[in-house]
């Protein structure tokens, strides 16, 4: 305990780190306050149906990414999902279109241009999602909820929604530049964590009362199980396969360069949380057939979150999307080419095509267990719900919420660790396995 107290004290001794932490907290507080600001012209006392609708399915996912703003009809209701969607599209274009491929190789200037394209595409997506969100409000809310009506009000509200998302993007960029961690990721994480106390309180109330039963002991068991799920998820996120790379010796003047062995860390889960997001989006398509008598039974089976076929298909799609997204983000050919240009080679493997085939084979092998484990994490909330856990609390046993929490927290801790080590302080955990630790 004394070691932990000393480490926290060291964090606040570093002036730059202290300022970054305070700046990040203030901007995140602005975001959370904005999540409760209802769109002008809408009565906040009439949002009951919208909040119940935003608690499950794809809309529940959108509500999670917006930190509850979707269900509050807030000015931040569209959240950062349009920006994430635009980022994914631009990333895919970087593989298929030569212009974006050139931008990826131009370093900082290319990154700025791609960020600009991402912003433009975000505005286009917002221009489509804004009217769709307003149409959904008109369906879900009673007429008395709208203080103003007509086409002009819808246009005004859409502009406010677009401005809200762009403001969130600005907050995220400011956090990334002058704060601590990745701004957009922290904004998403804060929205998820904000739901945890209410979910835990609801679960505790149901366990102690006659609703679910089991008492306080069962709640403690659930928390212990959640702890081990978190530990396993951290192992998945941090797990890597190190590929040794030997660099040839070069003599320049009186100095020798190269001749050392380094490692390429290939992540077991290179796709991150994106396969679960893609799979959840596609699992909403059977709802289209729910309105037809002939297909209503099939649609009901495929949209039951605790049903066998829903989770079986969902798990298979997560595995498939993990392979797809890994193939998109990890390019063995480019890695082999960069090694060859820098005079590097994998011991026992010829440079060029053989190196590409070797890296591709290694990625295929380590992606299989990673994808299966990711699929298990994705369907864990369904198992928790079937065992009697409250639906809100069950979301923290796996799925998108858990992966985002683990990934963002580890990334932020890594940055704090690097600040401490640069100033010759002990890290957060002297024997920890954070990526920022030396000697890993």
Image: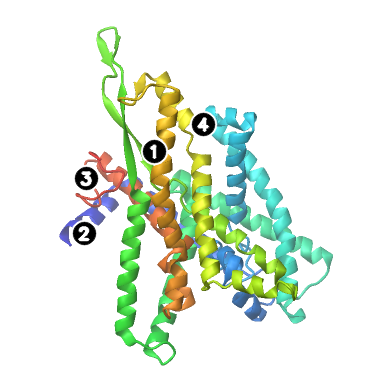
Answer yes or no: is residue 180 visible: no
Quarter assignment of residue 121: top right
Closer to the chain start, of discs 2 and 3, is 2
Label 2 vs label 4, nearer the camera: 4
Rendering colour mode: rainbow
| Residue identified by numbered label 1 | 362
Q: Residues within 10 Å of mark 4 (few under 14, many from 20)?
A: few
Label 2 vs label 1, nearer the camera: 1
Quote the CA–CA distance across marks 4 and 3.
31 Å
Q: Quadrant of the N terminus?
A: bottom left
Closer to the chain start, of discs 2 and 1, is 2
Q: Residues within 10 Å of mark 3 (few under 14, many from 20)?
A: some
Relative height, residue 338 to residue 310 (above, below):
above
Numbered label tally: 4
Looking at the image, residue 193 sits to the left or right of residue 235; the answer is: right
Q: Secondary structure at mark 4?
A: helix
Q: Quadrant of the C terminus?
A: top left
| Residue identified by numbered label 2 | 5
Relative height, residue 134 to residue 49 (above, below):
above
Q: Secondary structure at mark 2?
A: helix
Closer to the chain start, of discs 1 and 4, is 4
Image location (x, y in percent) of residue 3:
17, 56
Residue at point 46% right, 32% down? 332
| Residue identified by numbered label 4 | 108
Looking at the image, residue 129 sits to the left or right of residue 260; the answer is: right
Q: Which mark is residue 425?
A: 3
Depth check, front residue: 268 or 197: 268
Tell me, yes or no, whether the two marked residues, 4 and 3, touch with CB atoms within 8 Å: no
């Amino acid at each position: 305990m004394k070691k932990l107290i000393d480490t926290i004290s060291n964090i606040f001794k570093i002036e730059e780190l202290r300022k970054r932490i305070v700046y990040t907290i203030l901007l995140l507080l602005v975001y959370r306050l904005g999540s409760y600001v209802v769109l002008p012209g809408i009565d906040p006392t009439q949002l009951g149906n919208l909040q119940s609708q935003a608690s499950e399915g794809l809309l529940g996912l959108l509500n999670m990414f917006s930190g509850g703003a979707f269900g509050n009809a807030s000015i931040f209701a569209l959240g950062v999902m349009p920006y994430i969607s635009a980022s994914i599209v631009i990333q895919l274009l970087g593989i298929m279109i030569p212009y974006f491929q050139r931008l990826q190789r131009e370093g900082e200037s290319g990154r700025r241009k791609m960020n600009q394209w991402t912003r433009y595409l975000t505005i286009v997506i917002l221009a489509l999602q804004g009217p769709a969100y307003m149409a959904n409000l008109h369906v879900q809310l009673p007429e008395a909820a709208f203080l103003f009506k007509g086409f002009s009000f819808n246009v005004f509200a859409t502009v406010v929604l677009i401005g809200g998302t762009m403001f969130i993007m600005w907050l995220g960029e400011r956090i990334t530049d002058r704060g601590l961690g990745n701004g957009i990721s922290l904004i998403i994480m804060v929205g998820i964590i904000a739901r945890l106390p209410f979910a835990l309180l609801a679960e505790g109330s149901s366990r102690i009362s006659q609703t679910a039963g089991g008492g306080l002991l069962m709640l403690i068991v659930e928390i212990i199980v959640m702890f081990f799920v978190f530990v396993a998820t951290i192992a998945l996120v941090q797990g890597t396969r190190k590929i040794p790379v030997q660099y040839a010796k070069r003599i320049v003047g009186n100095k020798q360069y190269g001749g050392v062995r380094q490692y390429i860390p290939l992540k077991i889960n290179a796709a991150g949380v994106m396969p679960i997001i893609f799979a959840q989006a596609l699992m909403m398509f059977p709802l289209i057939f729910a309105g037809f008598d002939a297909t209503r039974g099939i649609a009901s089976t495929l949209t039951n979150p605790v049903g066998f076929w829903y989770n079986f298909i969902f798990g298979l799609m997560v595995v498939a999307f993990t392979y797809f997204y890994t193939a998109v983000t990890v390019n063995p050919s480019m890695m082999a080419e960069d090694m060859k240009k820098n005079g590097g080679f994998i011991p026992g493997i010829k440079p060029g095509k053989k190196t590409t085939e070797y890296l591709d084979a290694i990625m295929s092998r380590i992606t299989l267990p990673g994808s299966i484990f990711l699929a298990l994490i994705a369907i864990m909330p369904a198992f928790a719900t079937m065992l009697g856990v409250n639906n809100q609390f069950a979301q923290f046993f796996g799925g998108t919420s858990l992966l985002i929490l683990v990934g963002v927290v580890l990334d932020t801790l890594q940055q704090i660790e690097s600040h401490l080590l640069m100033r010759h302080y002990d890290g957060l955990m002297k024997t920890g396995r954070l990526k920022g630790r030396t000697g890993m």
